[in-house]
Image (tube, rainbow, N blue to C red):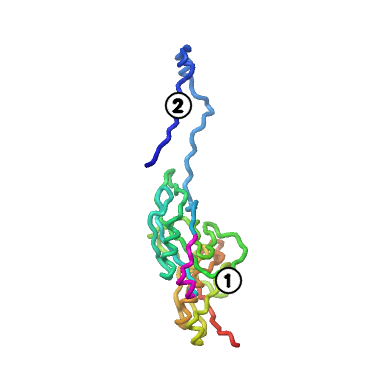
């Protein structure tokens, strides 16, 4: 049960002791002219977490040397609690771990027109082995916090699921490679290694204006190596690509080479 504690305003002590009440003239005095009114609460521009929970790396994924990223759609109540969560993309082996973690998150209430409202947003949970992660020492991009191993970022503004996807500018693989700031190396699939399978996996990548990969499609390459390539590349992050000084979403191709070492 919720308890509301209200402060009681004390009676005028002089009146209780029989002192002469204030005259009508005194009681009609206006309050000081410098009395301040409450400032309006500014509208929120992004969701700000006040409590987070790291996702646990699933044992099955660790044993199979799997890496990947799960995008989770959450609904946050007026009080900042996560009231629902669902996975919208990612390897099923990571889904439960991501959902279990995000349900324990709490956020500052999102303010619009001076009042808290319920919002919907999407968060990425990244799963990668520490030794495969290579990151430049750079400040995080605005509104996005770097995702650590099995840890999501959650500074993105709430997203409307009905918003149309932006157009994407085509960018060469060489140019986009120069913007890479966070890279996860793929794990060579044990079955492919034992079978002597090697080769190049080519992926079509769609990158948001914030520098995150939003979609990957296989163009070519051995199927035994494709999932390992996608599980690593979907976690890569880039400096925003600028067109006429403004960040834009882009599409490009990414090559991932798998080469067996010779003994």
Rendered image: mark on residue 26: none
* Residue drawn at (57%, 60%) of the image: 140
Note whether residue 259 is visible. yes
- Name the image quarter holding the N terminus: top left
The front one of 205 and 124 is 124
Residue under pointer 1 = 131
* Residue drawn at (52%, 29%) of the image: 35
* Residue drawn at (46%, 14%) of the image: 21
Percent coordinates x, y for residue 67 in the rendering: 49, 71
How crowded is the residue under tag 2: few (<14 C-alpha within 10 Å), some, or many (20+)? few
Note whether residue 251 is visible. no
Rendered image: mark on residue 9: 2
- Above/below status of 61 relative to 156: below
- Secondary element at image label 2: loop
Q: Tell me, yes or no, whether the highlighted magenta stretch contains residue 6.
A: no
How crowded is the residue under tag 1: few (<14 C-alpha within 10 Å), some, or many (20+)? few
Give the spatial CA distance, label 1 vs label 2.
Answer: 63 Å
What are the residue bounds of the magenta stretch? 54-64
- Above/below status of 89 relative to 119: below
The front one of 182 and 30 is 182
Q: Tell me, yes or no, whether the highlighted magenta stretch contains residue 58.
A: yes
């Amino acid at each position: 049960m919720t308890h509301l504690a209200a402060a009681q305003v004390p009676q005028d002590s002089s009146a209780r002791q029989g002192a002469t009440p204030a005259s009508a003239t005194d009681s009609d005095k206006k309050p000081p002219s410098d009395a301040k009114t409450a400032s309006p609460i500014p509208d929120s521009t992004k969701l700000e977490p006040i409590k987070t929970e790291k996702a646990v790396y699933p044992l099955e994924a660790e044993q199979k040397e799997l890496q990947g990223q799960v995008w989770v759609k959450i609904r946050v109540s007026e009080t900042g609690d996560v009231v629902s969560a669902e996975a919208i993309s990612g390897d099923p082996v990571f889904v439960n771990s991501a959902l279990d973690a995000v349900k324990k998150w709490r956020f500052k209430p999102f303010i619009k027109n001076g009042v808290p409202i319920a919002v919907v947003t999407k968060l990425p949970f990244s799963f990668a082995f520490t030794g495969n992660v290579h990151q430049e020492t750079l400040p995080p991009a605005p509104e996005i916090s770097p995702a650590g191993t099995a840890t999501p970022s959650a500074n993105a503004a709430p997203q409307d699921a009905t918003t149309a996807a932006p157009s994407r500018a085509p960018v060469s693989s060489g140019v986009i490679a120069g913007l890479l700031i966070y890279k996860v190396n793929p794990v060579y699939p044990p079955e492919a290694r034992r079978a002597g399978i090697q080769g190049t996996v080519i992926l079509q990548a769609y990158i948001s204006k914030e520098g995150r990969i939003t979609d990957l499609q296989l163009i070519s390459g051995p199927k035994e190596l494709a999932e390992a390539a996608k599980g690593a590349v979907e976690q890569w992050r880039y400096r925003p690509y600028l067109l006429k000084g403004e960040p834009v979403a882009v599409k490009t191709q990414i090559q991932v080479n798998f080469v067996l070492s010779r003994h």
